Image (cartoon, grey):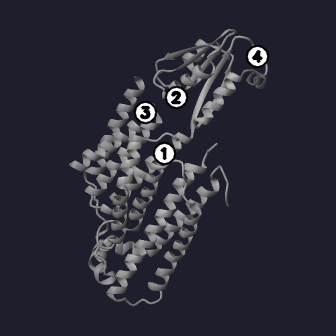
Amino acid sequence: MTDHSEIISRITGLLYPFILLFGFYLILNGHASPGGGFQGGAVLASVFITRYLVEPDRCIRLNTLKTAEKTLFVCIILYPALFLFVSPANHSELLNLIYLIVMNFLIGLKVCSGFTIIFFRFAFFEGGI
Amino acid sequence: MKRRIITMIFTLMLTALVFYVNFDAYLAADPLIADFYIEHFKPDTYAQNAVAAIYLNYRVFDSIFETLILLVSVTAVINLSWRRTDD
Amino acid sequence: MIEDIFLITLVILAIIALNTKKLRRAVVYLGVFSLVSSFVYLLYGAPDVAIAEAIIGSTITTVLYLVALRKYKVFSIYYTNDSNFQDIRLLKSESPFLYNLETFLVKREMEPQIIYSREPIETVLAQEKFDLAIHHTDQDIWIYGCAEDYQFDAVEDYLLTNHGDLNLHLMRCAEGEDNEA
């Protein structure tokens, strides 16, 4: 736990921005290409997991992530309820595109925070002496 | 050694089963539903990806309850961890 | 045709993962299993599911299993003695050697589990699954460990630096047929 490799730290530090870029690409292009909120959120969560490989001793602020996840869940319920369920008529193209992109983004952030909470809870709060 | 032999026989039997099931299986969905989605998803939702159109427009309840399941599992993990320093 | 090859690979990888001696290798085989199954999804024309399977199955789950394995490493120690002991707790308080060994293992994030046995050391060595077997005679302490276990090297270093005054004899035996490390 205390000894970690210098090589792995440097290389994962170099890889950070590329993983972040790939995650946001998956989320924001989810309506046009394979990918979407869930997959992109999992990629973003793997960014935090590689951060655990770089710095194994420091935890991140989980309370912020918990509140973020609850707020995002309320948003995920509210946006389709206000957009899709109010009227059976079809909306314009621009509104539909905005709806798809924003929903993908919300789902991605929520999945990212959920996976990160689960992983760091396991890594730092489970079975430690 | 006997265990290895039993394992090998089991592997071969499973392989034969996979071949048998996969040989003439029909691997596409019901053509009525598939045709409906393929024809209508573009004018209904303006998405280029049919999967996104389905899970964000036709079946939104699936997405909502999937995220709810993730939230419940996060709550369970937080409550069942050993060391409780905060909250 | 190529899907059939990958499906057979899936079955073989799953059975290999069940039959490994060490849990760590089983985790690695499961990661490869997820990767191959994501490729099968891709061949069947479902790239969304393939991306999800590749990320979750072979990255996040593998790392989570490895962290969990490091957290819960139960280290079983068999302890035999020449003289007939009566009370186990009394014995543990009398020998600082065992207590120190236990705290050392706890510091390395393992759960030491000491099993006191009345049987002679030969039957323990032949029959039981152990990480360490300690045989305590009046003058000497015989410690048996697995030759491939890297934890045993650390234990050896620690014991030789801190308990050099005791008559320690460290023996390495080959890995047994079913010895789960």
> Toward which corner of the image does residue C126 lie, by quadrant?
top right
**Circles 2 and 3: CB atoms closer than 8 Å:** no
Position of residue C138 relative to residue B87, above or below, is above
User: Which residue does the image show at 50% across and 17% down from the upper left?
Assistant: C172
Tell me the chain of label 4: C
**Circles 1 and 2: CB atoms closer than 8 Å:** no
Q: Nearer the viewer, residue C119 or A69?
A: A69
- The crowd level at tag 2 (other Cα within 10 Å; few <14, some 14-19, many 20+) is some
Tell me the chain of label 1: C
Where in the figure is residue A34, as x and y percent of width and height?
Answer: 30, 66
User: Which residue does the image show at 37% across and 68% down from the upper left?
Assistant: A27
Closer to the N terminus: mark 2 or mark 4? 4
Callouts 4 and 3 on one subunit:
yes
**Circles 3 and 1: CB atoms closer than 8 Å:** no
Q: Nearer the viewer, residue C14 or C105?
A: C105
User: Which residue does the image show at 39% across and 53% down from the upper left?
Assistant: A13
> Toward which corner of the image does residue C138 lie, by quadrant?
top right
* Discs 2/4, front: 2
Where in the figure is residue C101, as x and y percent of width and height?
Answer: 64, 26
Q: Which residue is mark 1?
A: C65
Q: Which residue is mark 4?
A: C85
Badge 4 marks a residue whose secondary structure is loop
- The crowd level at tag 3 (other Cα within 10 Å; few <14, some 14-19, many 20+) is some
Q: Which residue is mark 2?
A: C151
Q: Residue furthest left?
A: C1
* Discs 3/1, front: 1
Q: Which residue is mark 3?
A: C20
**Circles 2 and 4: CB atoms closer than 8 Å:** no
Amino acid type of the residue that numbered disc 4 sits on in the rendered structure: Phe
The residues tagged by marks 3 and 1 sit, at their Cα atoms, a distance apart of 15 Å
Position of residue C60 relative to residue C89, above or below, is below
Where in the figure is residue B13, as x and y percent of width and height?
Answer: 34, 38
